[in-house]
Amino acid sequence: MAIITVSRGSYSKGKEVAEKVAERLGYDCISREVILEASDKFNVPEIKLVRAIHDAPSILERFSHNKQIYVAYIQSALASRVMKDNVVYHGLAGHLLLKWIPNVLKVRIIADMSRRVAAEMEREQISESEARTLLERDDEERRRWTKALYHVDPWDPTLYDLLICVHRLTVDDAVDLICEAATRKQFETTKESLTRMQDLAIACRLKAALIEQFSDLRVVCEYGNALLYIQSGGRTLHRLEERARELEKEIPGINNLEVRSGIPAPGHAV
């Protein structure tokens, strides 16, 4: 079976598509549940986590440390949740966190702007120009958030396996296409994909445990062998090494844990 991520804009019917796909395949459908799980596990108010993934930094501003912490909590909750497999996730940027997992089907749902504007006008009881301005602002916020965190443009079609415009194609058409693709051999759960999922969950859990103290931390995990990278040296590096020894005993699935000074090579780092 597969993991399906549905990337969507507001009023694109992406939520409806995701829910219908999950219902037809018998999968769990998750979005806000990940926020609630992170809120409960890390004792952070839900509203702070929501703001972390919806309030994009300005052009001149980098992600604040608090925002990094909250995003790490959300990523950890999502990585743990998808380990159960058979999941449809329609939250923000799930396809990018899970991009190295072989059995993830990455879907982007888009919709005709005029229809989105009409839906916004009806919901908010505002003019066409006001609705268009709000939608364009929301699209830009999502774009800047993704660029700031993952350094890619979420509108890049190469990030997805399926790009579906709900216009001439209906919601049910989109559901048909996604369900058919999800049954392809390329998206079957394999030993390799299970290993990758476990590695990602370990990496995200390590980062969530350490990011509050070490803001420049990056984590890589392959086959249970975890590497912690930090650009700082001296006492900061020593403190990380001490904390790493504790976490190696606390987190199941870790075969070996090492701390290194520097930046990891491009790859599966979180």
Image (tube, helix red, strand yellow):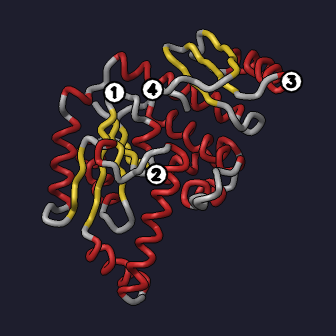
Alpha carbons under labels 1 and 3: distance apart: 39 Å
- Percent from the top left, x then y, of residue 258? 67, 14
Q: Are marks 2 and 1 in contact (CB under 8 Å)?
A: no
What mark, if any, has residue 235 been given in the picture? Answer: 3
Alpha carbons under labels 4 and 3: distance apart: 33 Å
* Of callouts 4 and 3, the N-terminal one: 4
- Percent from the top left, x then y, of residue 30? 43, 48
Residue on which disc 1 sits: 102
- Percent from the top left, x then y, of residue 211? 70, 36
Q: Are marks 1 and 4 in contact (CB under 8 Å)?
A: no
Q: Are marks 2 and 4 in contact (CB under 8 Å)?
A: no
| Quadrant in which the C terminus is drawn | top right
The reply, left or right, for residue 111 in relation to residue 241 is left
Q: Is residue 258 above or below residue 166?
A: above
Please identify, in this view, whether the residue under mark 1 or under mark 3 is nearer the observer: 3
> Disc 2 on helix, strand or loop?
loop
Alpha carbons under labels 3 and 2: distance apart: 36 Å
Q: Are marks 1 and 3 in contact (CB under 8 Å)?
A: no
What mark, if any, has residue 92 been given in the picture? Answer: 2
Tally of numbered tags: 4
Q: Which residue appears at 29% of the width and 48% of the height?
A: 157
The reply, left or right, for residue 161 in relation to residue 96 is left
Amino acid at dot 4: Met
* Of callouts 3 and 2, the N-terminal one: 2
> Disc 1 on helix, strand or loop?
loop
| Residue 182 falls in image quadrant | top left
Amino acid at dot 3: Arg
Neighbour class for label 1 at 10 Å: few (<14), some, many (≥20)? Answer: some
> Disc 4 on helix, strand or loop?
helix
Please identify, in this view, whether the residue under mark 2 or under mark 4 is nearer the observer: 2
> Disc 3 on helix, strand or loop?
helix
Q: Which residue appears at 84% of the width and 22% of the height?
A: 234
